[in-house]
Image (cartoon, rainbow, N blue to C red):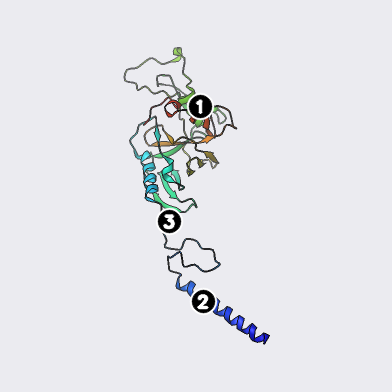
């Protein structure tokens, strides 16, 4: 009797396994995510597109257009990061320009936009500048001289230079200013460059991002920028990396970016610079 029951159970088990295998084979080309094999973890089936809502796609395209505009700079642009909801934007930067990739919160690619011409690159106000020479200007915006900087110099830091140019405002004394020349445009920067061009940026949320620089170093930073971006010149749009007050009290610029205290004030009072 026990033997008969055992044989019966084995037979029923075999039939159930055969049923699962048959249905798995039958549905192997199906894109219906409701047809799942019991007990087996399921990924997105082949043939099912990863999509984003229309408002997210519109926001993604709007963000890309910031780089395509003929804005000369220097000026401040604005973008509403809430338009991206919980989607991510990855930017891969090389000699060909910037490749924009939209991903969902799980990192799955939704779409990508081909690289732009080499002059159009995303950048960051963080890390070290991509040169060992900075240009110094007088308070009327005329180039005074070029300064060679060591790797441990504050002038090597993009955010320090940005802070000096647009927040702290260190001006050259009158006696050191160059003679006024007719037709010279009046800029107000003290040092350039005041940004760096990394090889990869990933905006993981409206207030956070990760950066990989060309020397291979990586950092995860805040992006508590109030929706502001820096356009130093045509073909460049920079994201602000931020850090908390535990690094150094007050508004200042370090290798990690700008202190988030710098963005506490009203938009019109943060930087001595026009809006784009």
User: Where 206 sits versus 267, above or below?
Assistant: below
The answer to which quarter of the image holds residue 27 is bottom left
Query: Closer to the camera: disc 3 or disc 2?
Result: 2
Choose the circle earlier in sequence order: 1 or 2. Answer: 2
**Label 1 crowd bin: few (<14), some (14–19), many (20+), radius 10 Å:** few
Image quadrant in which the C terminus is located: top left
Residue 135 shows up from this direction: no
Determine contact: label 1, label 2, CB under 8 Å: no
Who is closer to the viewer here, 38 or 153? 38
Q: In the depicted view, which residue is nearer to us: 76 or 256?
A: 76
Measuring from the top left, give residue 107's x and y in whole percent: 49, 52
Q: Nearer the viewer, residue 245 or 195?
A: 245
Q: Is residue 45 above or below residue 229?
A: below
Residue under the point 46% across and 35% down: 226
Q: Disc 1 vs disc 3: Cβ atoms closer than 8 Å?
A: no
Q: Find residue 60 and report its image quarter.
A: top left
């Amino acid at each position: 009797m026990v033997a008969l029951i055992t044989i019966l159970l084995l037979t029923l088990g075999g039939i159930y396994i055969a049923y699962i295998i048959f249905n798995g084979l039958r549905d192997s080309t199906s894109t219906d995510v409701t047809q799942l094999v019991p007990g087996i973890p399921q990924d997105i089936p082949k043939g099912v597109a990863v999509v984003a809502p229309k408002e997210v796609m519109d926001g993604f395209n709007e963000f890309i257009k910031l780089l395509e505009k003929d804005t000369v700079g220097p000026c401040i642009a604005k973008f509403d990061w809430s338009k991206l909801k919980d989607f991510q934007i990855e930017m891969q930067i090389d000699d060909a320009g910037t490749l924009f990739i939209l991903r969902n919160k799980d990192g799955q690619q939704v779409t990508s936009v081909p690289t732009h011409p080499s002059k159009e690159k995303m950048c960051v106000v963080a890390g070290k500048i991509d040169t060992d020479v900075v240009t110094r200007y007088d308070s009327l915006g005329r180039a005074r001289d070029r300064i060679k900087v060591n790797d441990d110099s504050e002038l090597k830091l993009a955010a320090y230079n940005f802070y000096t140019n647009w927040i702290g405002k260190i001006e050259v004394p009158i006696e050191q200013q160059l003679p006024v020349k007719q037709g010279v445009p009046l800029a107000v920067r003290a040092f350039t460059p005041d940004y760096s061009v990394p090889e990869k940026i990933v905006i993981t949320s409206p207030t956070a991002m990760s950066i990989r620089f060309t020397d291979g170093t990586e950092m995860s930073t805040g992006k508590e920028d109030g929706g502001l971006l820096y356009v130093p010149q045509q073909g460049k749009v920079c994201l602000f990396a931020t850090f908390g007050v535990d690094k150094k009290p007050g508004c200042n610029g370090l290798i990690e970016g700008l202190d988030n205290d710098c963005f506490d004030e009203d938009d019109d009072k943060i930087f001595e610079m026009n809006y784009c």
